[in-house]
């Protein structure tokens, strides 16, 4: 077990190194030409550009350039080129909004995804299944930012069917109720896509599991249908869902909610990345990418452990 | 969507069907059987037709712009007027007092449908450009990027998966790690980073030269970031196929690598590839929209459905059609593909509700 | 006269599928009394499993249609509602399946799965159920049952899993144990042990057994009576000794020719009856075995009834050949099989 963990963590570390290196290459090497003015952004002064050259060791070989960047990232001294704000601080500032969005939406999408998946699997082929399937597919087919835009247009304050505030994040410690109502719309919008997707996946898992031999065994034992469904069918068909959830959750914390954050102006980590991309600000993008990859890699280790706990067959003994 | 259709069969309809088809399933090719199932799935076919209609409409963007709307996708008509029912209407309102009431300026004209003889069917944007024309041209771009990236992505993933699955060993190890690495990136972030970096000067390495405004940039970026999403499951399938006897038999008879890959392995995963392909187009159209919305995809003034929504975002109060209409176009296209893909999967791999065991 | 537990009367089971109506079971009748072992034999696809599952009402689905009767102690299983069926399943009739690798739920311990069966039918507490589970595991010959009870199925070998399945099936002292190809997925050496175990436990638990197999050799030593099925029909039915000494159907001869022997390589028996079983959607007219029968003649275009044609009263078959002809052809066929092999 310990060896397994150590091996996974070493692998995770290597992935982090590789990802950061690739991100570095993407921004410094791919575009070609002299990177300094570009990194400095559209509003750079000559002094900025000279600073950058010096700071990034642009005259040194690329590995020491990379190394310098990483050093400043981990000592927390990395600064944005366009705003001169500390990148690590800025990311930390975005984390509460991003975490609030992710956790709330995660609870909604997991709960409703399971509900929807179970209902449509149990009634497979009947009207309720068909209706759910159509709704789920529509949910999957909508661009999340468009859905956000439309909901704001319809339901946010000052609009036709207004009953919710319009975007922005209010800290949980500042005002819990405002925190909640401000996030209600972003949560729902972000969750819609996942509900559709999880519903579909779970439905097909359940329909596969129902045909398993051990389910037939359970019926042959004389168990009531509800118990067969919950203890034998669902217990097994939820295993892949849990894994999926871990990875999606990590991806959303790591910035996959860029679009939702931007549309609702939540000022989370994702939006910070999106804004920095607009101004071609390399340090924040490096920072956010490392931060995001950290979560993705961390959660993939957690998911492996969880998987082993849920499925005795792969439990290391 | 018409999945698990078996549960719907009553004994009578089953008998009727069997008589109508004139033969039991024994000995028919799986493709024929799949076609038979698909043919009965009217919903899936209906949505396939919808997708085809959308594609054809976008392909007709040029003739429409020229003959019906009488304007190009990037032509401004600020300060101009057009006739509607004999009256002159401003394309974008100038504002000010008319007849004693104040009217805000800069508001484009709303959807005219057919009342203006084919002009401004879906209204105008703030530059006075014809939204319907831009919608069709934008759709063409979105479809090019979506379908093009799906093709490239599927092709690369397939070849990598075939090589990994066939050779195994260290080749497989390298390819699998390559998939893992892309997988570890947050997809959208990677795509945005790449899209932005490439849109500065274009790409000029390894003898390949792509200009910065080119549609190839979003197409290639999307193909690249989604490779593991297809490559991983395909590799898994091929690894399990390798154990099967017929592959060993072919290898034992001295069939070469390429032979085995393309004439033995490929036909066995072809149905999965086909389903993936339909669904990945849908997914890529959405990804393109997201990228363009953030400014890292199709570059202005080139329209795409994503950029149209981004443009309309700030005018959602005064000119809501600007954001709503391209969104509906995306939803319809993606939905059509998703429903068809779903039906295709059910037809190719009917998840046997019936246990057939011997 | 021992108590009659099961009586199946002209049972038909049909499934509606998108390819047409599958007549999986088409007029099957047999009886089973306490203490008896009934063998059901036939190639795969002949409707054995469907028959067995129907006895427990496990084939009830929207797309299934039944005809005939399945009487358990005089009550018609086909007419029972879900609650009544649950009462019967596992408690009065229980079943073990072909593949022990997939028939146990991988996420629960073996003990938990046995206890589940006990607790659903008997109002016992957890501790008592667990003790009983250990006791059962001992009875089916699992060593170290006290610690093995907490193992997961994947920690058991195939043979042990099948023993655990048997323990689970016997947990509530059922009257009837249905074993559907319990040894097909197991090694030959373990096969015999499992069959012997079932036979012994039948006496210990004072129940009756239906033993299903595609291999006549498996039931030869334990069955009292054998039903031979083909394409959803009973084509021959006789006390075991009669069936082996004086088989009447050419199909049965084929099955007899395919009993594995030490002097024959294993694979060859798979090909001993030429051709494949017919479609159950569009089955051949007349005798269902006609297209594959080397002795078919004009009369076979009309289907023979299942009736007694030899001196022995309980011996029924469906074949138009005269008894003398059969006996003559049979010698040649079985010998020929031997030579070909
Ligand atoms: N639920 C079902 N729906 C449709 N056909 C079925 C179903 N269950 C079994 N069959 C068909 O019925 C026939 C008999 O199956 P089975 O009883 O499992 O055969 P055996 O156990 O003798 O090998 C097979 O052709 C099988 O495909
Ligand atoms: Mg069977």
Image (cartoon, helix red, strand yellow):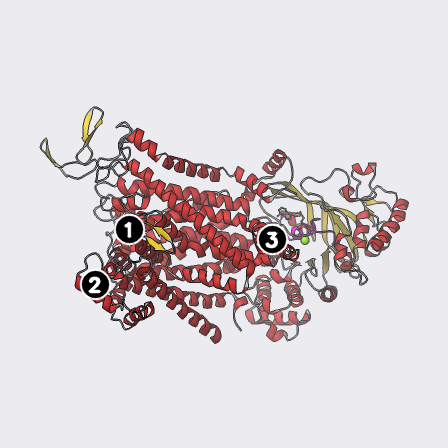
| Residue B226, image x, y percentages | 42, 54
- Report the mark closest to the observer, 3 or 1: 1
Q: Which residue in the protein does label 1 denote?
A: B295
Chain letter, disc 3 residue: C
| Residue A223, image x, y percentages | 57, 58
Front-most of A266 and A78?
A: A78
Q: Are marks 3 and 1 on the same chain?
A: no
Q: Which residue in the protein does label 3 denote?
A: C84
Front-most of B33 and A116?
A: B33
Quadrant of residue B91 within the rendered picture = top left
Residue drawn at (81%, 54%), measured in percent from left and top? C257
Report if the beta carbon of the residue with label 3 is closer than 8 angstroms to ligand 1.
no
Residue drawn at (31%, 71%), measured in percent from left and top? A64
Give the extent of the magenta segment: C40-56
Looking at the rendering, in which quadrant would you find the N terminus of chain C? bottom right
Q: Are marks 2 and 3 on the same chain?
A: no
Chain letter, disc 2 residue: A
Indicate which disc residue A49 carries. Answer: 2
Mark 3 residue element: helix
Mark 1 residue element: loop
């Amino acid at each position: 077990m310990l060896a397994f963990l150590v091996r996974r963590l070493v692998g995770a570390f290597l992935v982090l190194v590789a990802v950061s290196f690739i991100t570095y290459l993407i921004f410094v090497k791919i575009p070609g030409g002299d990177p300094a003015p570009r990194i400095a952004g559209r509003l750079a002064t000559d002094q900025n550009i000279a600073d950058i050259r010096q700071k990034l060791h642009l005259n040194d070989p690329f590995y020491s350039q990379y190394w310098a960047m990483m050093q400043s990232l981990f000592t927390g001294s990395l600064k944005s080129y366009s705003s001169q704000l500390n990148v690590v601080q800025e990311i930390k500032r975005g984390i509460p909004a991003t975490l609030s969005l992710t956790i709330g939406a995660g609870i909604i999408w997991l709960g409703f995804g399971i509900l929807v998946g179970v209902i449509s699997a149990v009634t497979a082929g009947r009207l309720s299944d068909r209706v759910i399937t159509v709704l789920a597919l529509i949910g999957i087919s909508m661009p999340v930012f468009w859905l956000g835009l439309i909901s704001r247009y319809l339901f946010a304050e000052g609009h036709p069917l207004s009953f919710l505030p319009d975007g922005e994040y209010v800290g949980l410690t500042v005002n819990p109720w405002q925190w909640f109502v401000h996030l209600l719309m972003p949560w729902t919008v972000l969750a819609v896509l996942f509900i559709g997707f999880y519903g579909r996946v779970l439905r097909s898992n359940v329909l596969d599991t129902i045909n398993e031999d051990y389910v037939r065994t359970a019926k042959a034992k004389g168990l009531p249908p509800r118990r067969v469904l919950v203890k034998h069918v669902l217990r097994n068909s939820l295993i892949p869902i849990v894994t999926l959830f871990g990875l999606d959750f990590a991806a959303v914390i790591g910035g996959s909610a860029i679009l939702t954050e931007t549309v609702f102006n939540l000022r989370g980590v994702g939006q910070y990345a999106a804004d920095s991309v607009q101004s071609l600000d390399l340090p924040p993008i490096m920072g956010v990418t490392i931060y995001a990859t950290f979560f993705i890699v961390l959660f993939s280790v957690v998911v492996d452990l969880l998987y082993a706990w849920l499925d005795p067959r792969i439990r290391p003994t | 969507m018409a999945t698990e259709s078996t549960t719907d069969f009553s004994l009578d309809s089953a008998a009727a069907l069997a008589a109508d088809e004139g033969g039991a399933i024994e000995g028919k090719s799986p493709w024929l059987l799949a076609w038979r199932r698909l043919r009965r799935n009217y919903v899936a076919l209906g949505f396939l037709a919808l997708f085809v209609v959308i594609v054809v409409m976008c392909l007709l963007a040029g003739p429409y712009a020229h003959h019906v709307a009488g304007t190009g996708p990037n032509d401004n008509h600020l300060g101009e007027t057009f006739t509607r029912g004999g009256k002159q209407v401003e394309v974008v309102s100038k504002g000010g007092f008319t007849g004693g009431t104040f009217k805000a300026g800069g508001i484009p004209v709303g959807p005219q449908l057919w009342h203006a003889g084919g002009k401004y069917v879906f209204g105008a944007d703030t530059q006075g450009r014809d939204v319907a024309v831009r919608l069709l041209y934008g759709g063409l771009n979105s479809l090019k990027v979506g379908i093009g990236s799906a093709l490239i992505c599927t092709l690369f993933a397939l070849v990598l998966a075939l090589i990994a699955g066939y050779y195994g060993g260290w080749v497989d190890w390298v390819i699998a790690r390559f998939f893992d690495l892309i997988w570890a990136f947050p997809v959208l972030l990677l795509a945005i980073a790449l899209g932005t970096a490439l849109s500065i000067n274009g790409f000029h390495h390894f003898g390949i030269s792509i200009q910065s405004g080119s549609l190839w940039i979003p197409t290639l970026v999307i193909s690249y970031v989604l490779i593991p999403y297809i490559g991983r499951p395909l590799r898994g399938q091929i690894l399990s196929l390798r154990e099967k006897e017929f592959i060993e038999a072919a290898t034992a008879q001295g069939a070469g690598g390429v032979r085995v890959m393309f004439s033995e392995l490929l036909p066995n995963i072809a149905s999965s590839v086909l389903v993936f392909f339909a669904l990945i187009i849908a997914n890529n159209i959405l990804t393109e929209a997201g990228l363009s919305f953030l400014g890292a995809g199709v570059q202005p003034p080139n329209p795409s459905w994503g950029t149209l929504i981004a443009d309309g975002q700030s005018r959602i109060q005064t000119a809501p059609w600007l954001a709503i209409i391209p969104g509906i176009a995306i939803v319809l296209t993606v939905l059509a593909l998703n429903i068809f893909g779903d039906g295709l999967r059910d037809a190719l791999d009917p998840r046997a509700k019936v246990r057939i065991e011997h | 006269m021992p108590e009659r537990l099961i009586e199946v009367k002209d049972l038909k089971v049909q499934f509606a599928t998108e390819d047409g109506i599958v007549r999986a079971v088409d007029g099957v009748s047999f009886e089973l009394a306490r203490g008896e072992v009934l063998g059901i034999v036939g190639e795969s696809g002949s409707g054995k499993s469907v028959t067995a599952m129907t006895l427990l009402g496990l084939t009830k689905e929207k797309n299934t249609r039944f005809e005939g009767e399945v009487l358990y102690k005089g009550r018609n299983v086909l007419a029972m509602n879900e609650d009544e069926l649950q009462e019967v399943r596992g408690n009065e009739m229980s079943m073990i399946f072909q593949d022990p690798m997939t028939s146990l739920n991988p996420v629960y311990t073996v003990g938990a799965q046995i206890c589940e069966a006990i607790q659903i039918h008997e109002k016992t507490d957890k501790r008592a159920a667990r003790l009983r589970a250990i006791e059962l595991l001992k009875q089916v010959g699992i060593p170290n049952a006290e610690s093995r009870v907490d193992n997961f199925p994947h920690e058991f070998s195939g043979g042990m899993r099948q023993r655990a399945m048997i323990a689970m099936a016997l947990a509530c002292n059922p009257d009837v144990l249905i074993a559907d190809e319990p040894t097909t997925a197991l090694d030959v050496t373990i096969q015999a042990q499992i069959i012997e175990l079932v036979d012994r436990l039948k006496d210990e638990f004072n129940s009756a057994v239906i033993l299903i197999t595609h291999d006549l050799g498996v039931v030869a030593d334990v069955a009292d009576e054998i039903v031979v099925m083909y394409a959803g029909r009973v084509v021959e039915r006789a006390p075991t000794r009669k069936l082996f000494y004086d088989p009447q159907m050419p199909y049965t001869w084929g099955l007899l020719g395919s009993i594995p022997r030490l002097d024959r390589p294993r694979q060859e028996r798979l090909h001993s009856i030429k051709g494949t079983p017919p479609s159950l959607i569009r089955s051949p007219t007349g005798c269902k075995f006609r297209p594959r029968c080397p002795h078919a003649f004009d009369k076979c275009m009309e289907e023979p009834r299942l009736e007694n044609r030899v001196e022995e009263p309980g011996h029924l078959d469906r074949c138009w050949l005269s008894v003398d002809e059969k006996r003559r052809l049979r010698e040649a066929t079985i010998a020929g099989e031997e030579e070909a092999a």
